[in-house]
Structures are given as C-alpha cells and as structure tokens.
Amino acid sequence: MKKKLIAGNWKMNGNAASNQALLQALLAQSADWQCRVAVCAPMVYLDQVKGLIQGTAIELGAQDVSAHAAGAYTGETAADMLKDLGVRLAIVGHSERRQYHAETDAVVALKAQRALAAGITPIVCVGETLAEREAGITEEVVKRQLAAVIHANGHCISEIVVAYEPVWAIGTGKTATPEMAQQVHAILRAQLHAATEHAARVHILYGGSMNAANAAELLAQPDIDGGLVGGAALKAADFLTIIAAAR
Ligand code: PGA
C-alpha cells in the first residue's frame, strides 16, 4: 500500500523566524512518521525552507508554477527554476488562484504539464463552490477540472497528485463529512482509472478545514490518500496530530 501524503499549504503566511520555529518543532517528531510529509512554502522562502529540511523527511513544495517555460512574464516562476531549487511538488489550480487570478482549467492543465516536464509532481486542485454543490453539479465540475489535466498530460497522468478541495470548506471551518469526501474521491479515482492503468497509485488528497480533530476520520476513507492542509499546517501541534493520523 502506498504511504499517505500530508502536505501543508502555508499560503501567504509566515516569515523567516516563524518558518524556522515551525519546521524545528515538526522535525523534532519526524522519527515517528508513517506517511510522507511536505510543506508548500511561499516562493521567497523556498530556499530558506530547503536549507532547513535538507536530509530530513520533509519534502519541499511550491504553491504555484508558471504556465510558461521562460521569458517575459514578470513575477512568474518557471518549473525549471523550482526544479533547480530542489522543489519536488507544486500546487496547481488552487481555488484561490482560480478565483483571484482567473486561472482557467486550460491554464491549470498547462501548469501541470510544465511541472511534470520539469520532474516536479503537480498537486492538482479540484473542487466545487457552494453554489455548484447546491445546484447538484459537484460531479460535473470536478470531472471537468480533472479532465482538462488528463487531456493535456496523457500517459503522465499517473504521476500527478490530485487534491479534492470543496471551495466552501476552505478556511471556513466547514469540512465535508468523510462520506461526502469519499464519494467525490471515488468519482475522481474512477475517472483516473479510465485514463491510466496506474490510477491506484495516484494520491488523492482531501483539503478544506482538515484539522487535528477530523483528520483521522477523513484519512480512514478508502480513497483518501492524504491531506492538503492550510490553517492547521501553521500550528506545529495540529499538523503533527494530522501526520500521526495518517498511517
Ligand atoms: P484550509 O486550507 O485547511 O485552511 O481550509 C486548505 C487549502 O486551501 O489548501
């Protein structure tokens, strides 16, 4: 069985001092970990975090990657640059980027493609808004979002990580029930099965107010292979409890 993956999404939080304190507190407990652990840090701190986690059990992740390979794209960061820095994973298509930066399914698919080409694992986020859930189109929305990435990446699709993050659950304290999450994860797994014979090895993470209290129940679901954790990843004790629940 594959090890679960717990990835912290720090978003635009922290500073050099708090990053160091957080990582030291996490690493003090790392001997007991049964799962993979990653932190997706802000771009400007990737190099600092890399230095602090080198040779440890924590994997380095970014929160975004450019859809372009190189060139006149002020402010963007290319997949090759991330690779150069030792980044292993990159979140693509987070709902905050889809919402605030107008990223379309096509852009997200391109970003996943750039990451894969550079040897970085894209963590492809999909998820419905509250209005979409209430309209009964959750399945349609998440399948459309994942289909764009499958279409653009062909046989490489087994190399991605998927994160199901219902938009209404992100940062709101509202979590999908384990049953609701599992239902969508099973849909995504079936979609991956139709695209690759290696679908079983793809990690499908749950994200959206995963915390120390609800992680164990979510992670016990058959198609939930880990978590993409926002707020709770900034508190060492909470993140460690989630990691301990992933076995
Ligand atoms: P949250 O964020 O855990 O704070 O809800 C998760 C995410 O957006 O990845």
Image: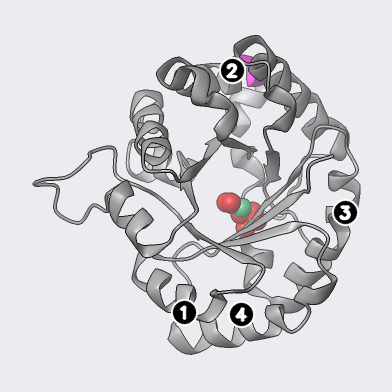
Residue span colored magenta: 135-140
Question: Between marks 2 and 4, how big is the CA–CA gap?
Answer: 36 Å
Relative to 214, does residue 105 appear above or below in the rendering? above
Q: Which mark is residue 238?
A: none
Badge 2 or badge 4: first in the primary sequence:
4
Are the residues at dot 1 and dot 4 in contact (C-beta closer than 8 Å)? no
Quarter-wise, where is residue 169 in the image? top right
Q: Nearer the viewer, residue 127 or 4?
A: 4
Q: Amino acid at mark 2?
A: Lys
Which residue is disc 2 drawn over?
Answer: 143
Which residue is more in the foreground, 119 or 104? 119
- What residue is disc 4 on? 23
Residue at coordinates 62% horizontally, 16% vertically from top-left? 196
Is disc 1 placed on a helix, strand or loop? helix
Badge 3 amino acid = Arg
Horizontal and vertical percent position of residue 121:
51, 43
Q: How many marks?
A: 4
- Comparing 118 with 191, the one in front is 118
Q: Residue furthest front?
A: 55
* Tag nearer the camera, 1 or 4: 1
Q: Which residue is mark 1?
A: 51
Separation of residues labelled 1 and 2 (CA atoms): 38 Å
